[in-house]
Image (tube, rainbow, N blue to C red):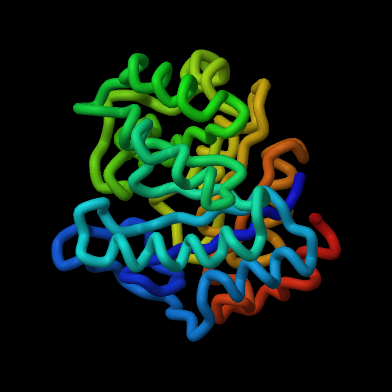
Amino acid sequence: MKFRPCIDIHNGKVKQIVGGSLTDENDYARENFVSEMGAGDYAGLYKKYGLCGGHIILLNAHDSEYYKADVAQAASALSVWKNALQIGGGITAENAADFLEMGASHVIVTSYVFVDGEIRFDRLEKLKSEVGKEHLVLDLSCRRKGEAYYVVTDRWQKFTKQPLNQELMRVLSSYCDEFLVHAVNVEGTGMGVDEGVLTLLSEENELPVTYAGGIGSREDIERVQNIGKGKIDFTIGSALDLFGGSLKFDEIVKEFK
């Protein structure tokens, strides 16, 4: 179990937001923290500590007036810590290689391969052909509906018809190198982890999995470790002191690097 750092970018700034509040209308999100530091500053810090495998998430839609500013922030981070950070947000088969050329180790994809609620295997094949399985992370971020968790797309606003389960991860494992899963119902709340999502992810799987969502205390990290059986990596957002929270970055790194 390892700590994976993050850099979330919205409206051209590094932020921490309440994930469930994100909407394309007026590029709105309820903010927990807006940083005075740029993405490159965070990348430099992660490089100093030798933290690989973190993710940069561009939170604006591809057609947003802010998307170019998001990409500029991301490019500065990728230039500082080359081939060490992953990037997601607006990734397609047409632009994925561009982000690798910028310095990303992996591209992170959801919406491009989940279209009208269904998995587009032709697009998965195209992505795999363009960048290689070893450079692709599939984001299976999910929200609860009824008794199940369903993959959500378009910045976590739209439900697909696809429940998150081991069969899905087994099928998709032949296309990607890792999975990233935001538990959107608790994302950005710091009110505790989603134990249902963690339980799903703790079942046997072939690839590395990173969990994000709701971590607000050391006890929450212990829950990730216990429910995840020590094999699920994790990220911390607004609860981390780098983003205005109380959990000490250097202590987390020392224990979980």
Q: Position of residue 117 (x, y in %)?
A: 24, 27
- Answer with left or right where residue 124 lies relative to residue 38: left
Q: Position of residue 257 (x, y in %)?
A: 80, 55
Q: Is residue 220 visible?
A: no
The correct choice, above or below, for 32 with respect to 160 in the image is: below
Q: Which residue corresponds to the image point at 56% horizontal and 40% vertical from the top-left?
A: 106
Q: Position of residue 243 (x, y in %)?
A: 55, 76
Q: Position of residue 122 (x, y in %)?
A: 34, 15
Which is more toward the observer, 71 or 153? 71
Which is more toward the observer, 121 or 188? 121
- Answer with left or right where residue 251 lies relative to residue 194: right
The correct choice, above or below, for 205 with respect to 62 in the image is: above
Q: Which residue corresponds to the image point at 37% horizontal and 64% vertical from the top-left?
A: 70
- Answer with left or right where residue 63 lies relative to residue 96: left
Q: Residue furthest left?
A: 25
Q: Which residue corresponds to the image point at 27% horizontal and 44% vertical from the top-left?
A: 154
Check the picture and name the quadrant holding the N terminus. top right
The correct choice, above or below, for 195 with respect to 243 in the image is: above
Instruction: Examine the image and state in which quarter residue 210 appears.
Output: top right
Q: Which residue corresponds to the image point at 27% horizontal and 30% vertical from the top-left?
A: 160
Q: Is residue 65 visible?
A: yes
Which is more toward the observer, 191 or 103? 103
Q: Residue furthest right?
A: 254
Instruction: Examine the image and state in which quarter residue 253 appears.
Output: bottom right
The correct choice, above or below, for 242 with respect to 22 in the image is: below
- What is the number of callouts on the image? 0
